[in-house]
Amino acid sequence: MSAPHLRAKAMSEVMSRRPRHSEPPSLKISDFFGSSVFNEDAMRMFLTEDAYYAVRQAIHQGQRIERKLADQVASGMKEWASSKGATHYTHWFQPLTGLSAEKHDAFFEPIGGGRSIERFDGSMLVQQEPDASSFPNGGIRNTFEARGYTAWDPSSPAFIMGRTLCIPTIFISYTGEALDYKMPLLRAIHAIDKAATTVCQYFDKDVNKVIATLGWEQEYFLIDEALYHARPDIMMTGRALFGHSPAKGQQLEDHYFGAIPERAQAFMRDFETEALKLGIPVKTRHNEVAPNQFECAPVFEELNLAVDHNVLLMDVMERTARKHDFRVLLHEKPFAGVNGSGKHNNWSLATSTGKNLLKPMKTPKENLQFLTFFINTIKAIHSHADVLRASIASANNDHRLGANEAPPAIISVFIGDHLGKLLDELERDIKGKMTAEAKTELKLNIGRIPQIMLDNTDRNRTSPFAFTGNKFEFRAVGSSANCAGPMTVLNTIVAKQLNDFAKEVDGMIKKGVKKDDAILQVLRDLIVSSKSIRFEGNGYGDEWVKEAEKRGLSNIKDTPRALDVWSRKETMKLFGEMDVLSAVELEARHEIELHSYMLKIQIESRVCGDLAQNHIVPTAITYQNRLIENVRGLRDVLGVEKAKKAAATQVKLIEEMSDHIGSIMTLTEDMIEARKKANGIEESRAKAIAYCDTVKPYLDQIRNHSDKLELLVDDELWQLPKLREVLFTR
Ligand code: ADP
Ligand code: MG
C-alpha cells in the first residue's frame, strides 16, 4: 500500500508507551493543598487588615469593595502571584459555550526611558473588557448595542495556572444581562438563601444564612493520543461516529492488558496533584465503569466554588492528559453500546448553624424541618420537571437520555422505601382534622425515621433524581456540562417552592392555625399533589415509559424540543419573579442552545460524510477489488464452471459489499441534501429541529452499513482504529 497505514502506526506508538510517573511536591497532601490559591492564609499574609476584611465581607455578606481597598487587594494579589512565579493575569469566566475563557495580560508595563514596572491595580482586578465579540450572546448585544465586560467575583478565590493569575469573574453586557453561566448561578444562590432562611425561621431563629452545597462526580474516558489522532471522528466530535461494538470478553483476550492501568494511574496521580494545588478537594477514587472509563469525585463544597472547581478540573484533566500521551473524552456518549458518562450532582442545603437541612434527624422537631425541605424539593421537581429537563439538554446528552439506550428522558424522583412509606403515612394521618392524639402520634412517627435510610443500601441507580440519605443526587447531568446550568434551575425552583410554602403556612397561621399544624397540613397537600413524580421502580424499563405517560409526566426525547420550555410564559414568570433570569436573558439562552445544538449535529454530519466517502468506501473497494481479482484468477485456473462453486463465497461477499457501499454513497448524498435544506432555514428552532429530525438519523444509518463493512473487510486494510483497540488497548 502506498498510503501510510494509520492504524498500524498508531498501534505501534501505543505499544511503545511507558508510564510517566511524576512525584507530588510532598507525600503529605496538606503541605501543598491550595498552594496555588489566593486563600485565607495567603490573604492574611499579603493583604492589609482593611483589605482582608473587605474581601471577607464581600465573600460572606456580598458587600461591595471600595475602589481604594480594591487597589490594596490587587496589589496584595499581585505580590502573592509574583512570589509564585506568575507573570500574567487574566479574568477567568464561563461563557455559554465552551468550558472557560480567558484573556491574558502581563503585569509588566513599560513606562518609557527603557524602564518598566509591574502593574496590577484595583481597576484591573474589578473589571475588564475582553474581546467578547466571539462569545455567544444570543442576540443580546446586537439588540442593545452594548459590549460585554467581566467583573470580579470575590466569592470564588483567585488562583494560579501555569504562570497566570486567574481571577474568577462573571461576564455581563453593559446593560447588565448575563452572558455566562455564573451570573444566574449567583442569583439563584441568593434566591435559595433568602427562601430557605425564611423557612428555617419556623424551626430555628438562629439560622441567618443557608448555602447550597454541591458534590459532583465526574466520569470520563481516557484514550491513547495516537489512537485519538487516527480517529478523525473522535478528534473532531468527541465521539466515535463509526465502529463495530467490540465483542464481549474482548478485554480478557487482549495482549496489551496491564499497561494502561499503570499509565492511567500515573496520569491520575499527576492531575490530582494539580487539582489539589488548586484547592480542589479530590479524593482518590477512580473506579472503572466501562472499559477505559473512570470517575473522579471531590468532597462537596459550597455551590459556587464547586462549580468553578469542576470547570477547573476538566481543564486540568485535559492539560495533564496530554503530558501523558492520553486524551480525555468528556463527551456523554463517546461509544455506542458501552456506558455513557454523566456528572452526578449531589446537592443539599446547609445552614449557617452547620446543619444539613436534608439530613433526617432524631427528634420530631428537627425532622419536621427535614421533611419540610425534603417534601418541598420533591414538589419543586414535580412543578418544574420540564425546566429541569431543559437544563440538562444537549446534543451530546441526547445520546444518554431518551435515545435508543436507557434511561428515558423522564424526570422522576426516587426517595426509597422508608421515606416513601413515611410520606404515605403522613398523607393518610393528616386527612381531615386532627385529634390531639393523632398529632402526637404523627410527631412521634416523624421522629422515628429509621436510620437504615442513611446507608444507601436501597439505592436505585436508574433514577434521574434520587434521594441518597442526606442529599439529592441529580444524575441526568451530562459529563461535559457546566454544573451551573442545572444547579441554577434546581436552586431557583426549590427557592420558588419554599416561597410558596411559606406564604401558605403564614396565611394559615394568620387565620389562627398553630404553626406546626399549619406546616403539617401544607406538607400533606404537597405530598398529595406531587405524588406522580415519585417513582421507585426500574427507570430503564419500557413499562415506566407507559406508566409515566399515564401519570402525565413529560418524556421529551430531544434537545430542540426540550428547550421549548425556555420561551414559555410560565418559565419567564418563574425566573423573573426569582430574579434569576430576565425574559431577554432566557430568550438569549434559548437561542444560543438551539444554535449550539444545530452546530454539533452539523459538524458530526460533515465528519461522518467525509469519513464515509474518503476512508470507508475506498477501503471497502480496495478489498472488493482483491476479491474480484481472486474470482478472476479462480476462473483462469479452474475454468468458469468449476470456479462457480469455488468462488461462490467471494462472489457473495462482493455483492454484499456492493450493497453496503451503494447504501453508504446514497445515504451520504441524501444527508448532504438534507443539510442543505436545513441550512436554508432562518429561524433557529425550526433549523435545529430540521437537523434533529432530517439530518441526524442518517448518522446511525451510515454507521450501520460501515460497521457491517468493517466486519467484512480484511483487517489489515482497515485504516481506522477499531473500537476494541480504542477501548481495550492497554
Ligand atoms: P457515592 O454516590 O459514590 O456512594 P457518596 O454518597 O459518598 O458517594 O457521595 C457522593 C458525592 O456526594 C460526593 O462528592 C460527596 O462529597 C457528595 N456529598 C455528600 N454529602 C453532601 C452534601 N451534604 N451536599 C452535597 N454533596 C454531598
Ligand atoms: Mg453518585
Image (tube, rainbow, N blue to C red):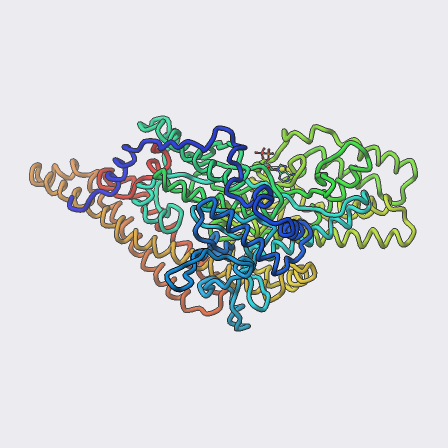
Residue 67 vs 498, above or below: the answer is: below
Quadrant containing the C terminus is top left
Q: Whole-percent x and y of residue 667?
A: 33, 56
Quadrant containing the N terminus is top left
Which residue sits furthest front? 113
Q: Whole-percent x and y of residue 531?
A: 71, 45
Residue 245 vs 588, above or below: the answer is: above
Q: Whole-percent x and y of residue 460?
A: 61, 35
Q: Residue at x 39, y 51 (%)?
A: 237
Exactly how many numbered labels are in the figure? 0
Q: Residue at x 11, y 38 (%)?
A: 634
Quarter residue 178 falls in? bottom right
Residue 342 vs 109, above or below: the answer is: above
Residue in front for this viewpoint, 413 or 726: 726
Q: Residue at x 56, y 43 (%)?
A: 42
Specify whether 118 is left or right of 708: right
Residue in front for this viewpoint, 406 or 166: 166
Q: Residue at x 31, y 27 (%)?
A: 255
Quarter residue 63 falls in? bottom right
Specify whether 494 is left or right of 11: right
Kindly tell me whether residue 162 is visible in this rendering: yes
Q: Which quarter of the frame holds ligand 2?
A: top right
Q: Whole-percent x and y of residue 686?
A: 49, 65
Kindly tell me whether residue 390 is visible in this rendering: no
